[in-house]
Amino acid sequence: MGNRGMEELIPLVNKLQDAFSSIGQSCHLDLPQIAVVGGQSAGKSSVLENFVGRDFLPRGSGIVTRRPLILQLIFSKTEYAEFLHCKSKKFTDFDEVRQEIEAETDRVTGTNKGISPVPINLRVYSPHVLNLTLIDLPGITKVPVGDQPMDIEYQIRDMILQFISKESSLILAVTPANMDLANSDALKMAKEVDPQGLRTIGVITKLDLMDEGTDARDVLENKLLPLRRGYIGVVNRSQKDIDGKKDIRAALGAERKFFLSHPAYRHIADRMGTPHLQKTLNQQLTNHIRESLPALRSKLQSQLLSLEKEVEEYKNFRPDDPTRKTKALLQMVQQFGVDFEKRIEGSGDQVDTLELSGGARINRIFHERFPFELVKMEFDEKDLRREISYAIKNIHGVRTGLFTPDMAFEAIVKKQIVKLKEPSLKCVDLVVSELATVIKKCAEKLGSYPRLREETERIVTTYIREREGRTKDQILLLIDIELSYINTNHEDFIGFANAQQRSTQLNKKRAVPNQVIRKGWLTINNISLMKGGSKEYWFVLTAESLSWYKDEEEKEKKYMLPLDNLKIRDVEKGFMSTKHIFAIFNTEQRNVYKDLRQIELACDSQEDVDSWKASFLRAGVYPEKDQAENEDGAQENTFSMDPQLERQVETIRNLVDSYVRIINKSIRDLMPKTIMHLMINNTKAFIHSELLAYLYSSADQSSLMEESADQAQRREDMLRMYHALKEALNIIGDISTSTVSTPVPPPVDDTWLQSSSSRHSPTPQHRPPASVPPPGRPPAVRGPTPGPPLIPVPVGVAASFVAPPIPSRPGPQNVFTNNDPFSAPPQIPSRPARIPPGIPPGVPSRRPPAAPNRPTIIRPAEPSLLD
């Protein structure tokens, strides 16, 4: 192929691809696509063809490219081409490729100059290309010919903009040298989609076809009508060369000879020609690859960091170490104990941010679930009063009692205390379940050794079950102790006198009226579809009311519901519903919200439901009783309506309520302490001091530390991945040091692209070799001219050619020239003194230095300037 720069990039990209393939990933470099834009017969296809280094595109006069050609270059070990419209055929002869492009164009557009926006997709597979996309676009035209539509100009414009608007495309704005650059539609369209000029490179073609005595030196030096990335001149093969089968290599030699021999271009010959264009585009590809490296490096480093933590585990398991199994066993048992303690006591490292776990869940059992179970016993008011009534009557027997019997109080209190056994034992069961979960989580790190994990789980779980029995015995003992003596002299007990004056409502009065108990999101589930359907709100529960808002900012309140006469009941979730639901209703059969007798509130999990219920209990909203109302009414009718009995029932009810509160407070305090002491703390001590001895006695060390086949394979894969990642990072580092990224050129004054062409010269490329100063310009402004053309001229004058009058040249040029004002004449042939007619004011002219053999008519003011 003819593009050596691209061939040098291929090994770098292949190294990256291989490095990523070794870790099972793909390297997405997404190299930019290159689009050529220009007028008809500007040489677009030839420029694109020279970049690839193959003859495969149709050329000729007039409109030859009549459909967009999307050329995908794909790196492959074999070289062939295929079209999307005939995938089954592989082309190895590129002359056939050209013929197929012409035939496919004619099939869609006809043979009479018609155009079509439907692209031709061509893929070229070769070992000499990068994975790139090149786009050959139809030339810009304004006058329809043949079968072309009347709006041909706008159709082609829209077609071109569709491709060059993408940020990932490089734009080659091709303009022939024998055309007015200020009227270049290619540059104008590139400016529309790339106003900063970061993606646009100007390409000047047909430099060998300019009129004798004219050249495009000012344009190619980026001084006249500048672009940010400048211009590159190329000399393509003529139609005669193409017909004569002149290959690209010979054409490149002729092109280089032209630039070296032409007096206007020889000093910039190293920055002209197709090889320099290839080098510039290849450098853009290099820049893109280098810009992609930081993201790739960051991705690899994050993976390496995550692997290092796992690889760290394997550093102690060296097969050649005879004491490896003993070390591993000791370390794993110690780590198991540390993990268990961290999960129970809490730790700052490896915090679970998705759900509660370990000690946090046990804390929730202690302070939410267990109090909830205790309070549930207090709500059954009618049953309690009925039991008190029966107790009073049975104690009096056949007599009519005059005083309230204290034995009734004691009997009812003991019955209430016995009820504490069930929730207390349930609390122990919940804690045991959580401990078993913690053990399983901690044992996951022992997965490398299945037998060790199994034995550890069995031994610790067995110990927890043993401690469970002792803990339950201790809790039952606590309750029996409470039953053994009813202490009516307790400082918090209200006493008989206060009990007679206390009412039920006063007893249930909330301590802190405005205390916020809970906030959170809940869904009102039973709003009809006609009224908007289920909707989520931000709920705020206080000691007196339940309010809900539009969002957590609590600015737009939707409703406030007082808690008086409210109760909670469970609701079965629907067949298709994933939510867990409970309901709030009014015991006096009133509507709770609008026309709803109850509000169904939905949560995402049963744990949330239980937590909300516990919060409602703290606010004095109790669950609904299980017995039906009519059954209660039937039994209520058996009560005596004796006022004296009613007073006695009320008194004992208040006494029982006061004493049960004391017992509940004591149990709520002692339960967590008992469970922590007898179960959790003992389990921690057992793991730290006795687990290792139990493991040694339960099985042989060799069998305990036998590694699973899956784990051995996993370790090998992990180490291989670890080393592959390191190798990939080294390759990226090598590419970073072996390639050079060119900085983006500084902005230039390209306002000429936005102004009308009437402000510029009709032939800005044509530059006479010498001319008189434009009329109206002071002679002193010009200053001495630069030295011989072989010396590059400073680029500081580019911005002075925007519009007439021309400002003075910068001072450094004068200093540069005045170093030797009487230097010898240049060693190259002088340019002709022919002055083309019609040079308007405002066009800069560059003159060679003054010399004795020049005619004085050309520079009449020269002697005065030198003086």
Image (tube, rainbow, N blue to C red):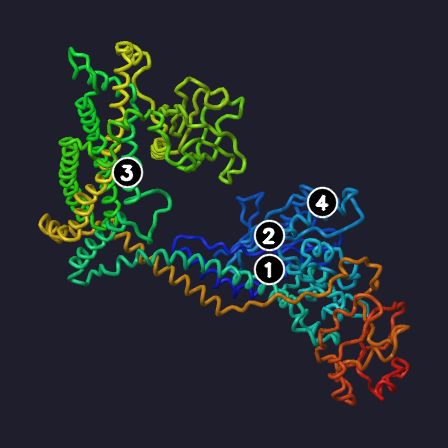
Check disc 3 and report its element: helix, strand or loop: helix
Query: Residues under labels 3 and 1: Cα distance?
Result: 73 Å
Q: Residues within 10 Å of mark 2 (few under 14, many from 20)?
A: many
Query: Residues under labels 2 and 4: Cα distance?
Result: 18 Å
Provide residue 487's location: percent of width, then percent of height.
18, 33
Judge whether residue 231 can be spotted in this image: no
Amino acid at the residue labelled 3: Ile
Q: Earlier in the sequence, mark 1 or mark 4?
A: 1
Q: Residues within 10 Å of mark 4 (few under 14, many from 20)?
A: many
Query: Residues under labels 1 and 4: Cα distance?
Result: 25 Å
Instruction: Identify the residue under disc 4.
Output: 115
* Residue 100 vertical position relative to residue 491 in the rendered view, above or below: below
Amino acid at the residue labelled 4: Ile
- Give the residue drawn at x 91%, y 81%: 857
Q: Earlier in the sequence, mark 3 or mark 1?
A: 1
Q: Are marks 2 and 1 in contact (CB under 8 Å)?
A: yes
Q: Earlier in the sequence, mark 2 or mark 1?
A: 1
Instruction: Identify the residue under disc 3.
Output: 365
Between circles 2 and 3, the one closer to the viewer is 3
Instruction: Identify the residue under disc 1.
Output: 52
Q: Earlier in the sequence, mark 4 or mark 3?
A: 4
Check disc 4 and report its element: helix, strand or loop: loop
Check disc 2 and report its element: helix, strand or loop: strand
Q: Who is closer to the viewer here, 285 or 695?
A: 695
- Label disc, if present, on residue 71 of the rendered structure: 2
